[in-house]
Image: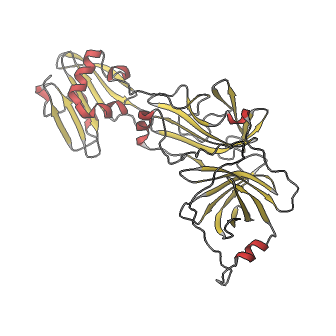
Amino acid sequence: MKKVIVSVFVVIALVLTGCSSGKSNQTGNFADSTPTESKTFGTPENSKKVQVTGENGEKVSDDESENNTEGWFAGFIGNKKIHAKIDISENKASGVYYYDDYKTNIKLEGHVDIDEMKDFRTVYLSEDTDKRGVFLGAFRTDDYIQGCWKNDNAIYPMYLIREGADITPPKQPGADSKRFDGHWTGKESGYFAGSEADIKVLFDDLIYYELFAFSGTALGALESFGIIENNVAKTVFKDTTYDEKKENVVFEFRIDKDSLHLDSNDYSYYCGMGVGFGSDYVKGKIEIKMPTAFEVGIVDTEEQDELFRKLVGDMYEDFIMHTSYVSYDEEIWNGEKVKVGISYLRGYSGCCAYILSKDHIYAAIIGDDGIYYYTNDKNYADKIPEPMAEWANKRSEIFYNYKEL
């Protein structure tokens, strides 16, 4: 299954909507296709059908594709019956599939990963359609594939059984397995760090999950299947990513009352520096408010917070976004004891600089086109204070903002 590591600055904005990735769309939106008692899963809509041609460009007829059953699988996407042929050469995979209702082949291209899940091959196949759907599957045996069809907007259960094989189709999710289904937010998630999980129960013995975590500007993302046994959904990864690691990485999901628990021997697996997937999650999204300048330590009192907010105006949120905390030192400047500090944020420290004196505030932030500087000290309305000068040399352009408070 696809695993992703990314590091981008805009992650802090994610927490403003309850720590939702909003992606993403890295994880996409899960369609409401939970199986019902009538065994209906839902169906991908408006797929563009592509007619496959032979080696010399001749059209392959519908009858030919239907009757050529050597190596063909039969199964379902949602509640629609399909046939598929998948050819594998080393780590490459290709093939076609068609809906039995249409008998028109849709091309597939992708790869197989034999080093991801222990004891299972995983396959990733993208289709040549406007919907850009993908097959994600795990070979339970050489003759049996379980997984899902997905795009950015939906996800549907999918399974394939090689024609002629004596294999019982998978069971639809029961009451216990359905408890995994949904969006989950890490209990310890906050404005500057957090985690979330999207889980889709595909069958009674299989879930598909997408994990996301961030700390400052560092991110982590992981998607895979979990095999359900005894009410525990488990993935065992063959960790060949890091030379120093020789052991398998295990992820186990379990439900306890209304909470989701993740047990792992490496919560940072496929995460950025200092990032880890949470161990405990609550159902749904949680409200995460932006902290104040007082709460992150930019100023010392709530009264100073109000002055700071008036001073920097619309840039207040930007200062907060770049300051998980401030490291201050005391200095003597102009015969007065002042506090001099810079902002700290995992992945991008030193974006903001601050000076606090008895009567004045001096604050500056690095923007795209230079440094934006704010003060209520008329004597420094158009010049950078000496304790901030070395830091300010990072940018040539300085935009001065003076406001009398």
Q: Position of residue 336 (x, y in %)?
A: 19, 15
At x 19%, y 32%, the residue is: 384
Is residue 99 at all visible to an observer of this figure?
no
- Considering the image in quadrants, where does the C terminus appear? top left
Q: Position of residue 186 (x, y in %)?
A: 56, 29
Asked which quadrant contains residue 281, the reply is top right
Is residue 82 at all visible to an observer of this figure?
yes
Report the label total: 0
In the figure, is residue 80 to the left or right of 354?
Answer: right
Which residue is at the front of the view, 159 or 311? 159
In the figure, is residue 35 to the left or right of 378?
Answer: right
Q: Is residue 113 above or below residue 395?
A: below
In the displayed image of the protein, which residue is found farthest to the front?
Answer: 38
Q: Is residue 269 above or below residue 257?
A: below
Q: Position of residue 32 (x, y in %)?
A: 59, 44
Color style of the picture: secondary structure
Which residue is at the front of the view, 11 or 396? 11
At x 59%, y 66%, the residue is: 128
Q: Position of residue 74 (x, y in %)?
A: 77, 61
Asked which quadrant contains residue 390, the reply is top left
Q: Is residue 61 above or below residue 138?
A: below
Which residue is at the front of the view, 88 or 8? 88
In the displayed image of the protein, which residue is found farthest to the right?
Answer: 166
Asked which quadrant contains residue 85, the reply is bottom right
At x 60%, y 56%, the residue is: 44
